[in-house]
Image (tube, helix red, strand yellow):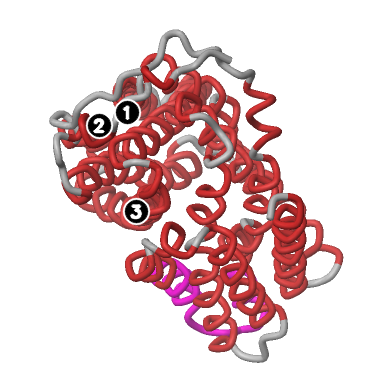
């Protein structure tokens, strides 16, 4: 591998003494706008497919899930673009691609009377939307870390995570309100507007130079280097997926009230934890933060799994949100430390792919468990999965003390 020291820019020179806030706010706004578009789509599509296109649950699930599959399959390409053309370029590509997705959604609504055509356009839109997510998020994370330096990588990942979850959490109810007030066409038109917001928010940030002479490492080798942290992330993400998929059904089965409060407490405590402790992965190290996070998440999953009342399950949701909140940045700090700065985009793409894979597998596996046993057994499975993440983390620590 060539010596790249002369090509590695000093982030202090690039930012021209910009503060952390001056870099983070534009990046976070760009990501927030992107995930608002995802929330709007998630809030609008099920009703449109069921009521306007007269299609069933399988079609709804296929259309919704296609975006995650698209994101997973394009992580490697997004990392390559980020490392070879620049993080700002990857971010810009994501903006323009989500703009195209918004246009495809509008075309699908316009073709609602021709069901197969509308569904075809929706499938294309979801694929495009997934590519946009992969490009913009990989670019944004790498851009922020490059401008602020590795010592702030945990903070960059933490605040981007807040933007992601807040965007989805606000986008879905916002779309339902807009659909009721003005129709679904307005909701999808807002996606185009938000693409512009995402672009404008980062227009003043400086680009980060790339090293054209750097000898790139194949994606599969980068994946291998971050696989320990990636697998720990994947196992710990099961609890989140179980709450997202089955908490409402658990409350319904038990005739408990306030299932929506479970979602609210998970999301609310997730965001609150990130707001209060965003500096912890950088300050105390990824290993310690991840270990404590896993323990809290296990306690939360067990509270739900053995709950005797709705309030006990809600407490479990809150604890799961607290525990899961810092897992991604804590493990991410450990992962990207192994990779040269010139390959940071590829490393983040490979690492994030484990999260995508986890969400794709968790639903079917948890569904089988719920069918064989009970909904509460799903959360015992979530606790077991998180315990597996602890074992992986300890094993990794013993190999790299």
Give the CA separation, mark 2 to mark 3.
20 Å
Residue ID at (61%, 77%): 300
Indicate whether 102 appears above or below 57: above
Q: Is residue 257 magenta?
A: yes
Q: Which mark is residue 102?
A: 1
Label annotation for residue 366: none
Tag 3, which secondary structure? Answer: helix
- Left or right, 35 with reference to 194: right
Q: Position of residue 401 (x, y in %)?
A: 68, 55
Instruction: Tell me the number on the disc at residue 159.
Output: 3
| Residue reaching furthest to the top | 213
**Mark closer to the observer (2, 3):** 3
Where 373 falls versus 56 (above or below)? Answer: below
Image position, residue 315 (x, y; %): 53, 83
- Provide residue 356's location: percent of width, then percent of height: 59, 41
Number of the label disc, if any, that sits on residue 195: 2
Secondary structure type for disc 1? helix
Q: Quadrant of residue 41?
A: top left
Q: Is residue 163 above or below residue 313?
A: above
Residue 25 is left or right of residue 82, and the answer is: left
Q: Over which residues does the magenta segment extend?
A: 247-268
Question: In this image, 153 relative to 308: left or right?
Answer: left
For discs 1 and 2, the disc positioned in front in the rendered view: 2
Q: Are marks 1 and 2 in contact (CB under 8 Å)?
A: yes
Residue at 53% over, 32% down: 349
Camera-nearest residue between 19 and 244: 19
- Tell me residue 268's x, y (percent): 39, 70
Question: In the image, what residue occupies the spot 42% across and 72% down?
Answer: 269
Q: Residues within 10 Å of mark 2 (few under 14, many from 20)?
A: many
- Nearest the viewer among 372 and 89 is 89
């Amino acid at each position: 591998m060539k010596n790249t020291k002369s090509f590695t820019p000093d982030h202090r020179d690039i930012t021209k003494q910009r503060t952390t806030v001056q870099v983070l706010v534009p990046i976070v706004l760009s990501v927030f706008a992107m995930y608002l578009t995802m929330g709007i789509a998630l809030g609008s599509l099920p009703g449109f497919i069921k009521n306007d296109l007269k299609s069933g649950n399988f079609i709804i699930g296929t259309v919704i899930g296609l975006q995650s599959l698209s994101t997973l399959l394009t992580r490697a390409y997004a990392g390559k673009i980020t490392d070879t053309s620049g993080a700002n370029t990857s971010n810009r590509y994501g903006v323009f691609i989500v703009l195209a997705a918004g246009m495809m959604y509008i075309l699908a609504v316009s073709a609602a009377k021709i069901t197969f055509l509308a569904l075809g356009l929706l499938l294309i839109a979801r694929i495009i939307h997934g590519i946009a997510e992969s490009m913009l998020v990989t670019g944004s994370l790498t851009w922020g870390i490059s401008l602020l330096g590795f010592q702030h990588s945990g903070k960059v990942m933490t605040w981007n995570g807040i933007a992601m979850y807040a965007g989805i959490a606000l986008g879905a109810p916002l779309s339902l309100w807009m659909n009721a007030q003005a129709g679904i066409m307005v909701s999808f038109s807002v996606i185009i507007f938000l693409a512009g917001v995402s672009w404008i928010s980062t227009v003043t940030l400086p680009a980060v130079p790339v090293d054209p002479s750097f000898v790139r490492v194949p994606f599969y080798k980068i994946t291998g280097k971050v696989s320990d942290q990636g697998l720990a992330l994947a196992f710990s993400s099961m609890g989140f997926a179980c709450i997202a998929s089955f908490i409402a059904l658990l409350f319904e089965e038990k005739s408990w009230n306030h299932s929506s409060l479970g979602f609210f407490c998970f999301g609310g405590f997730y965001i609150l934890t990130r707001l209060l402790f965003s500096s912890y992965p950088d300050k105390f190290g990824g290993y310690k933060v991840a270990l404590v996070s896993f323990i809290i998440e296990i306690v939360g999953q067990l509270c739900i799994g053995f709950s005797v009342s709705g309030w006990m399950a809600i407490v479990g949701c809150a604890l799961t949100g607290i525990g899961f909140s810092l897992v991604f940045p804590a493990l991410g700090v450990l992962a990207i430390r192994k990779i040269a700065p010139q390959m940071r985009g590829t490393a983040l793409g490979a690492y994030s792919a484990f999260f995508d894979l986890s969400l794709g597998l968790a639903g079917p596996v948890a569904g089988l468990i719920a069918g064989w046993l009970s909904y509460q057994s799903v959360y015992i499975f979530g606790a077991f999965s998180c315990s597996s993440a602890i074992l992986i983390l300890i094993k990794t620590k013993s190999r790299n003390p």
